[in-house]
Amino acid sequence: MEEGDRLVVKRVDGVLLDEQPVTRKAGRKKSAAIPEASPSRMGEDQNYVSGSFPQVREVLYNNLALVGKNLRIYTDPSGRQGFEYPTEVGIIDILATDPHHRLTVMEFAEEVTPEVLSRILGYMGWVRRNLTPGKDVKGMIFTNHIEESMLLSISEVPGIEVYQLRMSLEVNKMSA
């Protein structure tokens, strides 16, 4: 995605969280290509991000306000930032914090499966045990697709929300 593109983030329950122009943080390298959009399995009338989750992660890393006005990237005492944050149980896509130092684990998946749910729960448990003992940890799953049965399962897990990704690109001719 290029600066000036727009990224829309919606919760799966249909609540539009935000739509903002894409910006780039200083020091982050530019993505090689714009993510391709394909017809959604969630709704045929819209386009959704497909097959480019590393690029989408980078866009959200650079635009955390799309999912939480008060979120910022977590930085540990050694200076390591929460983008592709390594742990003993795997690599967290994005680890963010709020002004009250509550941590949020963000996981990106083409489709939400039991393995994805297990993975984010493992990350959340590791963060709670190693980074914020005694504090709640929030989980966010960003996806193109989720089966109704998985959505019902996740609705029973406190602290995890599922977000649908939709990318829009506007092209305007500027000359004759």
Image: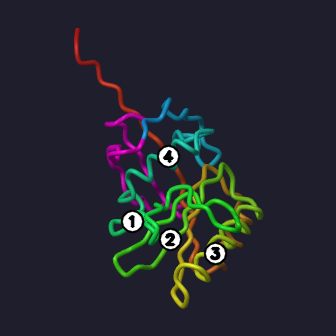
In the rendered structure, find residue 166 and report the number of the disc placed on it: 4
Q: Is residue 21 left or right of residue 59?
A: left
Q: Residue furthest bottom?
A: 134
- Marks 2/3 in contact by CB < 8 Å: the verdict is no
Q: Residue at x 37, y 53 (%)?
A: 63
Q: Residue furthest front?
A: 78
**Mark found first going from the N terminus, 4 or 3:** 3
Question: Which amino acid does the dot numbered 2 rest on?
Answer: Thr
Residue 7 position in % (x across, y down): 41, 45
Tell me the quarter of the image containing the N terminus: top left
Identify residue for label 2.
104
Residue range highlighted in magenta: 1-28
Q: Residue at x 37, y 56 (%)?
A: 18
Location of residue 148 by image quarter? bottom right
Location of residue 112 by image quarter? bottom right
Q: Residue at x 64, y 76 (%)?
A: 126
Residue 54 position in % (x across, y down): 56, 44
Question: Which amino acid does the dot numbered 4 rest on?
Answer: Arg
- In this rendering, the answer to whether 95 lies above or below 143 is below
Identify residue for label 1.
68
The answer for how far apart the CA atoms under marks 3 and 1 are is 20 Å
**Mark found first going from the N terminus, 4 or 2:** 2
- Marks 1/2 in contact by CB < 8 Å: the verdict is yes
Q: Is residue 117 magenta?
A: no
